[in-house]
Image (cartoon, rainbow, N blue to C red):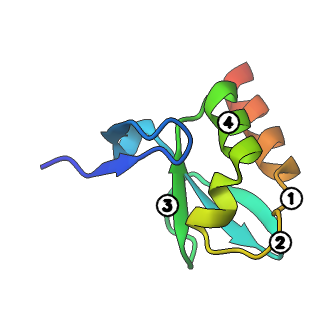
Amino acid sequence: MVAVRTCVACRSRGARTELLRVVLHDGRLLADDRAVLPGRGAWVHPTARCLDQAVTRGAFARALRASGRPDAGPLENRLKTLMDN
């Protein structure tokens, strides 16, 4: 059986292997490539479109139950690295 997750941006469902887990650490959004970091996680497609949509709509803050807007800079840098490879 394949684990299914929902993208916080586009709300489409996909296999856990197709989505990227994001966690909140010290007010910053971090990519959890191996899905092992502690705490609540949010799942997003590793595309610029879904990332932008999630940040604009505040989906990460809602899904991670964070107050205020978390810093998406580290996540955006990591995603750019993933897309360049």
Between the C-alphas of marks 2 and 4, the distance is 19 Å
Report if residue 60 is visible in the image: yes
Whether pointer 1 and pointer 2 mark residues with C-beta atoms closer than 8 Å, the reply is yes
Report the residue at 82% width, 64% height from top: 28
Whole-percent x and y of residue 41? 53, 65
Among the two numbered marks 4 and 1 on one chain, the one whose residue lies closer to the N terminus: 4
Whether pointer 3 and pointer 2 mark residues with C-beta atoms closer than 8 Å, the reply is no
Between the C-alphas of marks 3 and 2, the distance is 19 Å
- Is 52 above or below relative to 25? above
Whether pointer 2 and pointer 4 mark residues with C-beta atoms closer than 8 Å, the reply is no
Label 4 sits on residue: 53
Report the residue at 36% width, 50% height from top: 5
Q: Nearer the observer, disc 4 or disc 1?
A: 4
Density class for disc 4 (Cα within 10 Å; few <14, some 14-19, many ≥20) is some
Label 3 sits on residue: 35
Whole-percent x and y of residue 60? 65, 57
Report the residue at 76% width, 48% height from top: 75
Q: Quadrant of the C terminus?
A: top right
Looking at the rendered structure, which numbered label has been put on residue 27? 2
Residue type, mark 4 in image? Gln
Between the C-alphas of marks 1 and 3, the distance is 20 Å
